Image (cartoon, rainbow, N blue to C red):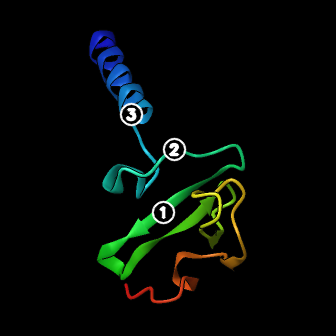
Amino acid sequence: MKVVTSILSILAAAAVGAAVPFGVAETGLEDRQASGCFPFEDPHCCVNYAVCQCANGWFYQYNEAQGGCDPPWGILGTDVSDIPGFCC
């Protein structure tokens, strides 16, 4: 029984370690930057352009001048449904 529990614990830890922020794996956009934000897109929900999702879960405009989210531009909202055009 201890062996089964150990194996399940190892598999669970591996799954958590392999987790990638939503949007990064699907779009190939870069990882979270020094600002704590990363580019986010969700084409299935009509967000087919990059916005920045930050560590606190808020969404900001993508910084076109810097080509990323370090730092992000103006705030879009505190929830994904606040992103202009979001349709899910």
Q: In the rendering, which numbered label is found on residue 40?
A: 1
Where residue 7 appears, x then y in whole percent? Answer: 30, 17
Residue that numbered label 2 is attached to:
31
Name the residue rendered at 45%, 89% in the picture.
85
Q: Amino acid at mark 3?
A: Ala
Q: Amino acid at mark 2?
A: Asp
Judge by depth and name the residue closer to the eye, 10 or 69: 69
Instruction: Point out the tag, 1 or 3, that comes first from the N-terminus.
Output: 3
Where residue 26 appears, x then y in whole percent? Answer: 31, 55
Residue that numbered label 3 is attached to:
18
Name the residue rendered at 35%, 79% in the picture.
45
Instruction: Point out the tag, 2 or 3, that comes first from the N-terminus.
Output: 3
- Say how many tags the image has: 3
Q: CA distance from mark 1 to mark 3?
A: 18 Å
82 is higher (above) or lower (below) than 69: below
Q: Residues within 10 Å of mark 2 (few under 14, many from 20)?
A: some
